Image (cartoon, rainbow, N blue to C red):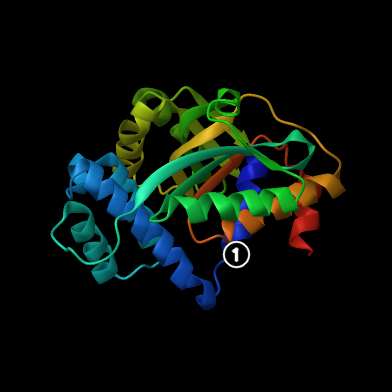
């Protein structure tokens, strides 16, 4: 997982520019709307909403914008469009599997943009179920190892119901069943431990290894997909090596 985590760090740095914050806020607001619509507007009773609000705060999203998105989700604010959440499956070049989470008000537009971007890069859309079997749905936390003690994190995570705790380079990674998210988050919060990244995501059962040139090609394809307005998250089974991460940083 660490290769994916390091690449995520690079993307966060690249996306830190103020010019991109509008898009980041829009993406997070959609997550809040969907979460509030499905589970209510109280984050203490709605794990998914709590997670979305945590993302919003980490991105310095204004409190008024967060509150407005919650009200739109609960129906207290009738303004705006009606979003739907869709999961698409596909392949990048070299058979790299992709799970693509979208939130959109126009399904036809979203599919057309996805298909165009993938085909242009030598990939294609896939039928439902033809890719998802290659992934597990998991709870994931990444904690900076230079700030917190591994043994302390290990004990807390095991007590909270985590399935796996690893340390690689500068990250302590916690993985568990989706149902364990709230318990792990609560244990970390009570111990005043802040994660660098957390959420419920798709984790590949096996990764595909490519040379650096082709790894970068697939990484660029994923970046191009992430530029589309309706994309929320993309997960792949690409093995992202340290060499590829360094090459990406130097571009």
Between residues 89 and 216, which one lies in front from this camera angle? 89
Look at 39% across and 58% down and name the residue there: 28
Query: What residue would you read off at disc 1?
Result: 13
Q: In the rendered image of this protein, does residue 233 appear above or below residue 127?
A: below
State the residue in front, 59 or 92: 92
**x and y percentages locating residue 64 in the rendered image:** 24, 70
Query: Which residue sits furthest front?
Result: 108
Write the residue at 41% across / 49% down: 194
123 relative position to 212: left or right: left
Q: Name the quarter where the C terminus is drawn.
A: bottom right
199 vs 38, nearest the viewer: 38
Residue 130's spot in the image, x, y percent? 59, 26
Q: Is residue 231 visible?
A: no
Would you place residue 77 above or below residue 117 in this image?
Answer: below
Q: Is residue 145 left or right of residue 55?
A: right
Residue 204 coordinates in the image, percent (x, y): 61, 29
User: Residue at horizontal 41%, vertical 24%?
Assistant: 158
Q: Residue at position x 61%, y 54% from top?
A: 225
Q: Farthest residue toward the left?
A: 76
In x, y percent, where is residue 88?
A: 52, 40
- Secondary structure under badge 1? helix
Q: Residues within 10 Å of mark 1 (few under 14, many from 20)?
A: few
How many numbered callouts? 1
Q: Is residue 208 left or right of residue 179?
A: right
């Amino acid at each position: 997982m660490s290769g994916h985590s390091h690449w995520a760090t690079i993307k966060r740095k690249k996306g830190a520019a103020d010019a991109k914050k509008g898009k980041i806020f829009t993406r997070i607001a959609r997550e809040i709307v969907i979460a509030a619509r499905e589970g209510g507007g109280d984050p203490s009773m709605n794990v998914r909403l709590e997670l979305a609000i945590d993302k919003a705060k980490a991105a310095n999203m204004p409190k008024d914008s967060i509150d407005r998105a919650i009200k739109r989700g609960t129906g207290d604010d009738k303004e705006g469009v009606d979003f739907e959440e869709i999961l698409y499956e596909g392949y990048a070049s070299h058979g790299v599997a992709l799970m693509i989470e979208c939130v959109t008000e126009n399904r036809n537009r979203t599919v057309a943009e996805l298909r165009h971007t993938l085909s242009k890069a030598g990939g294609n859309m896939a039928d439902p179920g033809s890719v998802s079997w290659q992934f597990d749905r998991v709870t994931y936390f990444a904690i900076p190892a230079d700030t917190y003690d591994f043994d302390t994190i290990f004990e807390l995570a095991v007590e909270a119901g985590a399935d796996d705790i690893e340390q690689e380079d500068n990250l302590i990674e916690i993985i568990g069943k989706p149902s364990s998210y709230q318990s792990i988050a609560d244990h970390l919060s009570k111990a005043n431990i802040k994660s660098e990244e957390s959420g419920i995501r798709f984790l590949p059962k096996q990764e595909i290894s490519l040379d650096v040139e082709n790894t970068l090609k697939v990484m660029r394809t994923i970046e191009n997909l992430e530029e589309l307005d309706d994309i929320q998250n993309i997960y792949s089974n690409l093995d992202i090596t340290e060499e590829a991460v360094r090459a990406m940083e130097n571009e």
